[in-house]
Amino acid sequence: MPSSNDQRHVNPWLIAVIVSMATFMEVLDTSIANVSLRYIAGSLAAGIDESTWVLTSYLVSNAIILPVSGWLATRIGRKRFYMLCVALFTVSSLLCGLAPSLSFLIVCRVLQGAGGGGLAPSEQAILTDTFPPAKRGQAFALYGVAVVVAPAVGPSLGGWITDTYSWRWIFFINVPIGILSLLLIYFVVPGIEPSQQTDARAGKRIDYLGFGLVALGLGCLQVVLDRGQIDDWFASTRITIFVIVSGTALILLVIHELTVDGPVVDLRLLGKPSFFIANLIMFLFGGILFGTTQLIPQLLQQLLGYTATLAGLVLSPGALLVICLLPLVGFLLGRGWQPKYLIMFGFLNTAAALWYMSGFDLQISFATAVWARCFQAAGLAFLFVPINTVAYSGLPPGKSNEASALINVMRNLGGSVGISVAQTMLARRSQFHQSRLVEYVAPMNLNYRAAIRGTAQRFTTDAPAGISRMARSIGSIYAELGRQALMMSYLDVFYVMSWAALCSVVAVWFLKKTKPGEHAQAH
């Protein structure tokens, strides 16, 4: 039986594959349930608005555990903590699939988010400790396949499973993968125990106040970002209270963690300029990745009538392209290419792709949408791995757990902010464009009157009682006006995101060049 501190030789690439399995499973669950909410609501006799807590509860729990996962891994041992997270995620997935009511499902999603929140930081720390600096870029390339591809295939996979079988199977599929992952981790992945210095630090009193402030601050912030647009932001008393509580808790957290011994979140790491900038860039990357991954299929379903499965298939070729390009990125890093320049290329390519998307119209073909996503995916492939390479370079000894937790928090927080901003812009810009377009829909406008007559001639079948062909024509024109306004708002969001990607290059410029062997001092 392998011990927790087993240091026998294991092929590092086998370890990378094993830890990537659990990552793919966890990241997939952040998006796979989105397309199944109305089925969940109908099956459990709940409203659509209530069912959105299936998503919110997972994200809140995930956000709370992420920043403290490095501290927990340090205290109880990384392998032991990692296996505990996989087990909790697997068991809670089974319970989610068996849920008899919405309240039970939400509780299970909280547990699932708690288990999932500890996976990514532990996995990145394991890869950092397993691979030498020269091979670390290639290892993160393999790991990046799971992180970048999973959100892309989640909606299409979730839609296909729900349409073909039942929404419960989007949770059941995690069970065999989780069991297999547990067995492989136990028998294959060597245990890496904390150093004596870390053990001494871990033996001090537990930072209960820090943990409470993390839970309160990030938990409330995640609720605000996820529910803000639905509840009309500060017009809602609940959202206003959550903002005040979150802001106060996070300010107190920063003050507390910078002054206490053995903090639950090591914010002092952000004092290292390259690590701080890498976290900022990862925040921007998360916003663009998760924001566009939600926007594109949403546009296709809302305005072009695509099914969830077909809309997801638009993203799939881009995911395959990422799989093909990530090994190239890892190879370039291994050959001494500066991560800084690869990140710049990635953001410039992404900006160009989003600018191209801002020229879409309501007649775009399936092929056009696929090629646009592939264009964007080519840039995303050059971001994740180099950003992580820069983040872990030159870290103090024994800090890989804490660093992994922080950088994963920034990616997920960036994703939440990106989605929230995009959805708010969609709603506000749609209202703006609709108010402008209505100016041309006036009874005395000759073009409008001609459009009514032309549309009325197409309604040759009998209308419902009391509804004339003219009324149906006016209704059709106003429906088209709404579609045009919504499409224009999508184009606005793509345009703004293209500028955001372009401005990200400025932040990248301040990254210093990494020196060969510099990241060796992390261990």
Image (cartoon, rainbow, N blue to C red):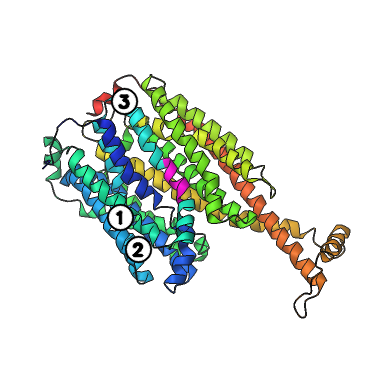
CA gap, disc 2 and disc 3: 40 Å
Within-10-Å neighbours for mark 3: few <14, some 14–19, many 20+: some
Q: Secondary structure at mark 3?
A: helix
Q: Which residue is mark 1?
A: 175
Label disc, if present, on residue 135 of the rendered structure: 3
Task: State whether residue 200 appears in this view.
Answer: yes
Residue sitting at x 66%, y 52%: 487
Quarter of the image with the C terminus in it: top left
Q: Give the spatial CA distance, label 3 vs label 1.
A: 32 Å
Q: Is residue 454 left or right of residue 89?
A: right
Q: Does the magenta portion include 211?
A: no
Position above or below: 179 against 41: above
- Marks 2 and 3: which is nearer the front? 2
The kind of residue tagged 2 is Gly
| First reached walking from the N terminus: tag 2 or tag 3 | 2
Disc 1 packing (10 Å; few <14; some 14–19; many ≥20): many
Locate the N terminus and report the quarter of the image it occupies: top left
In the picture, the disc for residue 97 is 2
Query: Pointer 2: residues within 10 angstroms few (<14), some, or many (20+)?
Result: many
* Residue 502 at x, y percent in the picture: 55, 34
Q: Position of residue 320 (x, y in %)?
A: 48, 38
Residue type, mark 1 in image: Val
Q: Mark 3 belongs to which amino acid?
A: Lys
Query: Which stretch appears magenta?
Result: 148-154
Q: Quadrant of residue 305?
A: bottom right
- Residue 24 place in picture, x, y as percent: 36, 45
Real-space Cα distance between discs 1 and 2? 10 Å
Please, what secondary structure does the residue beneath circle 2 have? helix
